[in-house]
Image: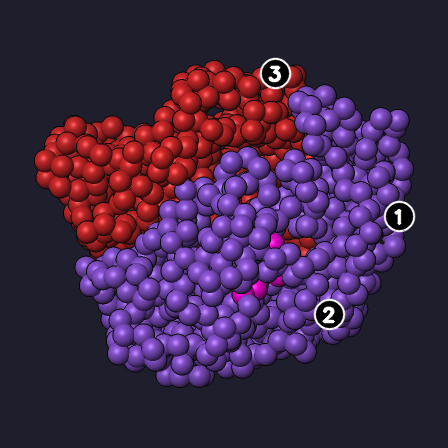
Chain colours: A purple, B red
Amino acid sequence: MTTTAPAGTDVDELRAIADRIAAQARPGEQVEAYVSRGTNTSVDAYRGEIESLTQAGSAGIGVRVIRDGRTGFAYAGSLEEAIVAEALAEARDNLPFAEPDEWAGLAVPDGVPATSLHVHREAVLATPVEDKVRMAIELERMVREADPRVKGVRAASYTDAEGAFAVATSTGISVGGRSTIAYVSVSALADDGDASVIAGGMSVGRAIDEVSLHEAADDAVARLLAKIGSTKPESADVTLILEPRLTATLLGIVSGMLGGEAVAKGRSPFADRVGEQVGSPLLTIVDDPTNADSLGAEPYDDEGLATRRVPLLQGGVLQGFLHNTHSARRVGTTSTASAARGYSSRPGISARALTVEPGSGDLESLLATVEDGVLASALGGIHSGVNPVSGDFSVSVEGVRVRGGERAEPIKEATLASTLQRLLLDVSHVGADVEWQPGGTGGVTLLIPGVSLSGR
Amino acid sequence: MIEEPTLERVLQRALRTGGEFAEVFAEDKAASNGLLDDGRVEQLSSGRDRGAGIRVVVGETTGFAHTADLSEAGLLLAAEAASAAAREGGGGVREVALTRTDVPDPSPVAVLPDDVPKAERVAVLRRADEAARALGREITQVTASVGASRRRILVANSDGLLTADDQVRTLFSVAAVASGDTGMQTGRKSAGHTMGWELFDQIDVEAFAAEAAQMAVTKLRARPAPSGRLPVVIGAGSGGVLFHEACGHGLEKDLVDKGASVYAGKVGELVASPLVTLVDDGTIAGEWGAFAVDDEGSPGRRNVLIQDGVLTEYLWDFLRSRKDGRPTSGNGRRESYKHLPMVRMTNTFLENGDTDPDDVIAGTDHGVYVAKLGGGQVNTASGDFVFGMLEAYLIEDGEITEPIREGNLIGNGPQCLRDIEVIGDDFAFGGPGTCGKDGQGVPVGDGCPTLRVKQLTIGGVSA
């Protein structure tokens, strides 16, 4: 097996490519180049062997050209000089077919200093492939041998990656950066009558020494065994207990509804509600990519502005929205540096490091206060059952019934329904047990009474 | 894309450390997209991704590497990286001689989207916007998009296979928001086919947009969805996603082999109502999941998965069929050259029954009629599935009455297949879908006639 580490990405080289494109702006034009490059290693283990080992790199460029309010965009999955030049030409060629937009424009340096964040680890590149392979094989073994009821492992993997990017514009932006991530994940199977149950666990960090095989294995096995014997529950109105990782899922959906573009275009139920009570007084939500505890921490957004702390809800009162340059100009405010994109698309808007300000207690202490509830372990059908425009919320749920403050029977084949607006207002308790999730969001335990559980 | 002698040298290099099988998958994909939103054509964008993925198999282990550099030097480097996983085997030189096989394209293209002037491509967006807004003051927002892609692939492997495919897909979609006293509701409609710009010969753009807008307006007066178990009539077309989730994924041989499917060991058994015949067919001209060859170079095929309720066949890719010493079923697919192939569906559909669809509804005393299903997902190990109702109505005394708000439907695959009580004779294909599995999305089609399931659980709030 080869152990040569790929060379780390030279951010200055990416910046040079981006600068060169931006410098080709003609009079009356604004030009932006977004350049990215990444390498990754991924190992899947199965029954003590390597099932697959992937080592690869990829790169690409996206070019925006704006003239007279019209935007042209083109991308290419290569940084070869001729192809990059073609992307610029193609963006210019696409431009006349867009209609003028008075708010079109690229980011302009706004004086906000970038936070220095330690988000890159040389270890990702320096670690021999053999060590990464061992992680996946060991994780698979740990789960298989953890309990006689584990009948197999569907997948056990180790993945790490380095990503680097640069953005340059003819309006004075020229920044770049790089970061790394590493994670292990495993999904395990057990027999349950005629069918099987499956559950997963993972551990995430910025390099191999920041992930824990035990954490992933223990989580997968505990979740798996808890599912055995699940039945369809009776329909009821219950108190929903969301563990930190599912609260993170809920926050992700809510932050999508607080995106400036959805708001400006009348697609968010929260439009025009700044200053109003849209959530429980217990809820304070911020997006803070300058917080190095979050895996979503980044010094710059994808338009090249320094990231900053963005308050969204304060004591349940709506504070504002997430903006990129375009949505901010449209509603007459400034960007919150929330632009997010890959090289093949124009900048969208996304939160990077959402969190809820901690309240008190943890999952166990809050669960003990619930008379009649459901502790959810998994929510399904989120992409089909949650409508971010109307707020309609209907998801499938697996978990355990809670009665008199104690865990009772495990449940499956049931749904939870409400609206997102209702869920936010009805939060009756916020835990202090912040857990940072792989997606960058910090979740806490939440209690939400009055949710419809549909089953038998 | 790559010359034959280069491919042969790259495959030989990939096998040098003892690999048993090596493959080069090269892809050149050009895509363009026009987007109208908020009353304005916001952009016409275009792009190109080109590269190759190389895999080397030894025993049960696969090594994989990909590169955007299609020069011989770039490919040789990737071949070496891919062969790193195959270190145990003996070295040596194995000759590879390629024989070119051309598979007829099931979906010939009349008009390449790239040959249509850009102005004409964005003009359909304007028409859609006007038609949707013309429906009434309630329509407060409209998004229309038209996307076209041309994906040329080449597959060469150490068994001597050399083949290619040229896949052109065109997608048109309209989404509308209606606002009223009860808040906002959404409607949407998409048409996607493995064909060129001639897609618009079969679409009335204005009527299509008005239909999406009407869905949003209708839902403004929708009442909350009921909660609990009820009989459910699924409308022809988009209901095919039910079979994709309830059963299709569980027939993918990679999941079956890992004990992650409720259908493991059930071939030859009655697994569904005898009314059910389920087919996966990658050769249906123009359908969203159609192709000449799959992403391992095997020709698309029609595979009958369930015949009159009896499970007849699983879905296979190269690795799974090689292990079991049988031919692949043409279901080895991947999102792009950056991904390893795995077992995937193509166009999955339920065949016609013999009942008049009106009688299916009339025969339902109290239940829910789902005119349009959205996306779904399944836990293949338990068979439990969930999918969204985009447009649904109550059925009272055998008649469709009030619209109901969006919600999820849930059920268990094997139970649902047994609970199919009646099947209509009005088969239709549904809209274009993107099926996600292990992080990879591929285009799939589905379809079904009107049918009734004895009961599914509706995830609503009202008793």
Residue range in magenta is: A351-356
The CA distance from mark 1 to mark 3 is: 37 Å
Q: In the image, are marks 1 and 3 on the same chain? A: no
For badge 2, the amino acid type reads Val
The CA distance from mark 2 to mark 3 is: 49 Å
For badge 1, the amino acid type reads Ala
In this rendering, does residue A10 appear at all?
Answer: yes
Instruction: Write down the chain letter for disc 1.
Output: A
- The one nearer the camera, A92 or A154, is A92
Q: In the image, are marks 1 and 2 on the same chain? A: yes
Q: Is residue A133 above or below residue A347?
A: below
Instruction: Classify mark 2: residues with Cα within 10 Å, few (<14), some (14-19) or many (20+).
Output: many
Q: Earlier in the sequence, mark 1 or mark 2?
A: 1
Instruction: Write down the chain letter for disc 3.
Output: B
In this rendering, does residue A187 appear at all?
Answer: no
Are the residues tagged 1 and 3 within 8 Å (C-beta)?
no
Q: Residue at x 47, y 29 (%)?
A: B140
Local secondary structure at mark 3: helix
Where does the image place residue B58, in percent across and percent down from the top left?
60, 64
Q: Residue at x 39, y 38 (%)?
A: B183
Mark number, residue A16:
1
Mark number, residue B120:
3
Q: Which residue is mark 2?
A: A124
Tag nearer the camera, 2 or 3: 3
- Residue A367's image quarter? bottom left
Local secondary structure at mark 1: helix
Q: Is residue B184 above or below residue A414?
A: above
